[in-house]
Image: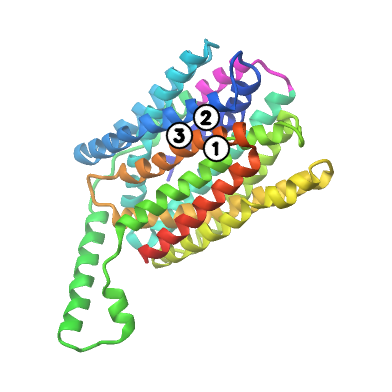
Amino acid sequence: MRWVVGFIFFKIAFGLLSVMLPIYITQSLSGGNLTIWGIMAATATFLAIPFSFLWGYLCDTTQRYRFFILMSFAAVTLLLYVFSLTTNLLMLGFLYTLIAIFEVAHEPPKNVLIAETYSHGEWKKGFARYEAWTELGWIVGLLLGFLLAALSLANSTILLICAFLSLASFLASAIFVMDPALIFERGLVSIEKSISLVQRGSMLLTKEDTDTHVLEEFKLENPSALCIGLVLFALATSIFFTPLPVFFARKPLTLPTSIVFILFILNSSSCFIGYLLTQGKANNSEGSGSIKKIALLRSLLVLLPIFVILPVSQFLGGIALSIIVLVAMGLVYAFYSVSVLSLSMEVIPRGKAGLFTALAGAGSAIGCFAGPLIAENFGFQYTFIASAACFLLSFVAFKKFE
């Protein structure tokens, strides 16, 4: 998987942006606040949704996956460069939207490359390996942000560094990314599932096996429940994480930007460890069960800031407990990400490779707006409660999918 090199550079750039940008918008620009940041992030994510379908359809139809990856990285490089030249909020919002639209262009072809590189039985291993390497890039980006924040480097310079990192991702991908010689693995999976369904139906019709477990297996999967679960899980995650850097930077915690970067580094590091652990589990059949448990666990974790962190925020214990929450969140997310990616490649048909990205984008877009809006007007406690409620609803949806 040498082609992952370009994606690592891309993740470094966006890891740096993930913490720097909301703090920059809310603390350094005239007229910027959490609500403005939420509107920017939500608008960009919403408008990127139809393009997720478009990029997925086009790359599957043309089977030119390399082209769309290179187009994504090249466009984002140019837009980040222009982004670094302005401080106008309206212009920044427009450019950020364009960045989101072209950023999602590499997701569907990337998923197809992994699915066609590995056999069906090793899809989870392939996605875990990709996510581990790119998560490592995200961690490097956060570390770079910590160093640049400690050096008090100008925001325009940091944005320019992000543009150069995106350029490096384009150059590396131009060298290493190649279209698959044959496109057949997802087609084989569809055939296998159809044959298995017919076989189970024949057994029931001939009354060769009427055990309860066979009747349960014969029930058709509920893809609508899976889609709803994906949207709700992304919504809950976005509600929690979008305003989180500002939560740490504001009172009562009032942590410096460099320390905020450290907290997110620990979150991503635990996620990286989770991806490494997931590589040893190549059984795709465990996917639906694990995502259900993770949704329930996350609903409990996002409530800890209310009942544990805020009451001791004036003490060092507040930081320590924040670390525990973020580490746990990152670890369980790794298992969710790998399971749901491999599961989506089984359920989502060819020609609709962008559906998964679009569904996650829909939830993220709503959360990007709702999270900061709730935090700004009602307080962070209600933001965390809303996130927990959405995680619980996603648990119910994933349970219906089984």
Q: Residue furthest bottom?
A: 208
Q: Are marks 1 and 2 in contact (CB under 8 Å)?
A: yes
Q: Which segment did they paint magenta?
A: 151-165
Q: In this rendering, does residue 23 appear at all?
A: yes
Looking at marks 1 and 3 on the same chain, the residue that comes earlier in the sequence is marked by 3
The count of marks equals 3
Q: Are marks 1 and 3 in contact (CB under 8 Å)?
A: no
Q: Residue at x 61, y 15 (%)?
A: 29
Q: Could you tell me which secondary element the residue under label 1 belongs to?
A: helix
Looking at marks 1 and 2 on the same chain, the residue that comes earlier in the sequence is marked by 2
Q: Main secondary structure of the magenta part?
A: helix
- Residue 154 part of the magenta segment: yes
**Residue 321, how many percent across, how many down?**
74, 50
**Residue 263, how many percent across, how many down?**
69, 40
| Front residue of 12 and 54 | 54
Disc 3/disc 2 C-alpha distance (Å): 29 Å
**Residue 173, how many percent across, how many down?**
40, 32
Disc 1/disc 3 C-alpha distance (Å): 32 Å
Q: Residue at x 49, y 39 (%)?
A: 367
Quadrant of the rendering where the C terminus is positioned: bottom left
Q: Residue at x 31, y 41 (%)?
A: 354
Q: Amino acid at mark 1?
A: Gly
| Front residue of 232 and 148 | 232
Residue 99: image quadrant is top left
Q: Could you tell me which secondary element the residue under label 2 belongs to?
A: helix
Q: Which residue is mark 2?
A: 38
Q: Which residue is mark 1?
A: 371
Q: Could you tell me which secondary element the residue under label 3 belongs to?
A: helix
Q: In this rendering, does residue 118 appear at all?
A: no
Relative to 337, does residue 399 appear above or below in the rendering?
below
- Residue 145 part of the magenta segment: no
